[in-house]
Every structure is written in C-alpha cells, then in structure tokens.
Amino acid sequence: MNLVRYLMESRGPVNALRRLPTIARRFGLSPQRMERALQEFAGIARGHGCKPTLAVTAVLLERYPDVFRRLDGAAELAVHGYVHTDYSLLDDAAQSEHMERALSAFRSLEISPLGFRCPYLRWNDDSVHVAARYGLVYGSNRALAWDAIGPDDVGQQAWDAYEKGLRLYSAGEAAGRLSLPSRINGLIDIPASLPDDEAMVDRLGLESADRAVAVWTRMLDMVYERGEAMTLILHHERVAMLGRALEAVLQRARAQDPPVWAASLGEVAAWWSDRLNWRLHLERDGDGVYRVSGPDADAAAAIVRGVETDPPGRPWYGDYRLLPARGFTVRSPAAPVIVVEGGSPPALAEFLREEGFVVAESGSEGLRVGPCATFGEDDKRPLLDTIERSGAPLVRLWRWPNGARCALSVTGDVDAMTLVDFLRRPLEV
Ligand SMILES: [Zn+2]
C-alpha cells in the first residue's frame, strides 16, 4: 500500500524506473560516498558559522552507527521517521510505536534529538501530539513555496511536475503567509522553504548549480526583506551537484548588514519559545514621553521608527533604529502603539503582541487597526503590510536575536546512505 501510494503520488512507476541509473550513480553501494557528502555538507555550513540540522531516518542509525556517531556534533541530528514512510496515513498508536523505536535508535548512540521532520513532509495532528509527548520541542513539516522561480523559467511540463510535488507536500504559498516559527499543539513549528534541492533538480529540471544559486539567493533576499525565516533543504545525495549553491547562499547571508542569523532548527526553536513569551511594555512618563521596558535578555532587541529615544540606538533597517529591548525612553508626539478597534477577535491583538508591538485598548491614541469580524492565517501578512506602510511612529520587540534581520537554517533529510537503502525505503512501513 505504502509502495503503491508512494510511486503514484511521487513521479509514477515508469518515471521511478527511469531514474534508477541516476540514483545508483548518486548513492553507490557502500555508505562511504554518502558519508563524505554528509561531512562535506556539515563542513560547508560550519565554515560559515552555521550548525546544520540533519533529519535522519532512524533505521539508518541502526545500520550505520559509526557514520552518525562521527556526524553528531558536526550537525544537529533530528528524527526523520523510524522508516521513510508516509506518517500522515498512520494513527497515534502506530506513530507512537515508530517514535519509540526511532528514539531508542538515537539513544543507543547517546544522541538526544530535539525535533523531527516527517518523510515527504507528510504529517497529521497525531504526528505533532506524538512528538510533543516524546519530549521533542520542534517540528519542521509545514512547507511554504517561494516565488523565486516561475513557469516561464522552466517550461510548463517541469512546472506541472513541481506543482504536483507542492500538492504532495501540502505546501502553502509564501507570498501570502508568514514564514515564521509558531507554536502548534505545544511544539515549535518551523516552516520548510521550497523549492528544495529535490524539487529543483528532479522536478524543475535545474541541473546546474548556477540556476540553484539564483533561486536560493532570490529566496534569501525575499526572506531578508520580510525579516522572516528561511529553512533551506538540501539532501546529501545532491551535495556534489549543489554544494556550491549552499555555499553561495551562506556567503550572501554573511555579507548582510544587519546580519542574517544562521542557526540550527534547535537553536531557532529555543529562541522562539523564549521570544513568544516576551512583551514590550510602554508607560507614559509625561507629555509625549514614554518609558519602554522589555525582556531582561542581552540578545533581545527593540526597533523603533519615527520617534526620538534615549539612548539614541543605532541605524538598523529601512527607517528603523535598533535598541536593547531591556529599557529606553521614547519621545514622540503620537503614542507609538497600535490600537485594535473594539469588536475585533482577541486573536488579532494576540498576534500583534506576539509580533512585538505594543497594543493599546480601543479608544486610546495610536495607529488604529480593525475592526474586523474574523482574523486568521491569511490576514496576518496584509495586516503587517498595512502597519509597515502607515509610516506611523512605532516601537517593536524584534523577532530575532542581536538585531539580526532574518533567520536562515540549513537542513537536510537523510533518507538513505546506499542504493540498497534507497530501494528498500518504499517497502518499509
Ligand atoms: Zn525524506
């Protein structure tokens, strides 16, 4: 059942057979070639001060314990299923059994994974409940597709194959969503960014590293402009082909000022779970003077625009200035807060607070938003765009540590170490 579904939903049995020689060349019969690729992957990321996250199908830890013992430390290891199956088809009991076996494989190498990514990015609510119950703290399963490439770049046939892949992954469109971590059922969820290497090479037909460089750097530029998070996925079997593209993205990230925070998924999850609890408070301290106080954490940063502050802070991004979030004084004729009009759902104000704004009661002075009858995922981006465009004076607790503009995580899914592993995958349920 799993095999049939896999073949039908991925690229069809004929296509799968046609790809066999390419796959044989990629993997090899012993794990040496793929271990070199994993180490090279980790080396490129570490060379740019970034700890990569590799989600490993746990049965591979049982097959090649030494490979992963050597890799642990160079990369953060996460769970990519016990076997490479479609977990969206399994219920809570079955997924618990798989998680139990997966974690025991990790434990026997004295590795404690913090998070998981499901094979094929396919998951259900039970996947999240099970992961939280077994003590994991993050997942990276929701996928967002970025407009870094279009049908005109690759031709209609390749584009159709890509869109089929996006449906398989239930990917949302990054253009209308926020590519940010969120807390879902007790777990920090960090969205994966598409296209990944597999989509670029096998679906979009981009065989050259140069074209991959163009797509991924365009994605990084969009994420940077929006101040969000990018989770790049590169499978180790394509490091030989696209390692240069990974290098180019990391180089571009390092050249930015304000900086890009290159971090593992575990580091992003730890930061975000603290960050979600932090708020900025604003107290009036005379005419047009406000005292701002925030979290007592060195890395926490506040951004301001259209106001004078003491201390003055330093120029940051666009018209914003950067200050330590712990405390400062603001001088502004207009209150640098957002007022949610009465009758709006509580989710609206809650979202703005999580986004670091100071939210005031209806009737106060400040930038007015709402009223609206409903507020959901699709309303978040337009709301932030409206606030941004308003030009109103604002203070805000920023999303990322130490004044970084955005976050970048470099990740890979380790599904197979040899051709035999690859061929066995669809048979393992
Ligand atoms: Zn996989």
Image: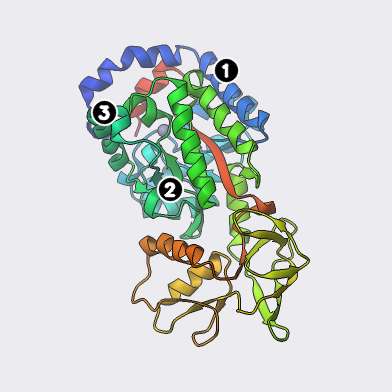
Left or right of 150? Residue 315 is right
Alpha-carbon distance for marks 3 and 2?
43 Å
Position above or below: 295 against 400: below
Q: Which residue is mark 1?
A: 36
Discs 3, 2 touching: Cβ within 8 Å: no
Q: Residue furthest right?
A: 311
Quadrant (top left, top right, bottom left, bottom right) of the C terminus: top left
Looking at the rendering, the quadrant in which ligand 1 lies is top left
Camera-side mark, 1 or 2:
1
Q: Is residue 427 visible?
A: no
Q: Is residue 321 left or right of residue 206?
A: right
Three-letter code, disc 2: Ser
**Residue 244 sits in which quadrant?**
top right
Where is mark 3, residue-wise?
155
Task: Tell me where residue 212 appears, x and y as whole percent.
Answer: 45, 27
Measuring from the top left, give residue 261's x and y in whole percent.
Answer: 63, 45
Between 47 and 398, the one nearer to me in the picture: 398
Whether pointer 1 and pointer 2 mark residues with C-beta atoms closer than 8 Å, the reply is no
Q: Is residue 363 above or below residue 41?
A: below
- Which amino acid type is shown beneath numbered disc 1? Arg
Amino acid type, callout 3: Gly
To which quarter of the image does residue 81 belong?
Answer: top left
The residue that disc 2 covers is: 96
Position of residue 89 relative to residue 338, above or below, is above
Q: Secondary structure at mark 2?
A: helix
User: Mark 2 or mark 3, which is nearer the start of the sequence?
Assistant: 2
Mark found first going from the N terminus, 1 or 3:
1
Can residue 365 be seen in this snapshot? yes
Whole-percent x and y of residue 217? 50, 35
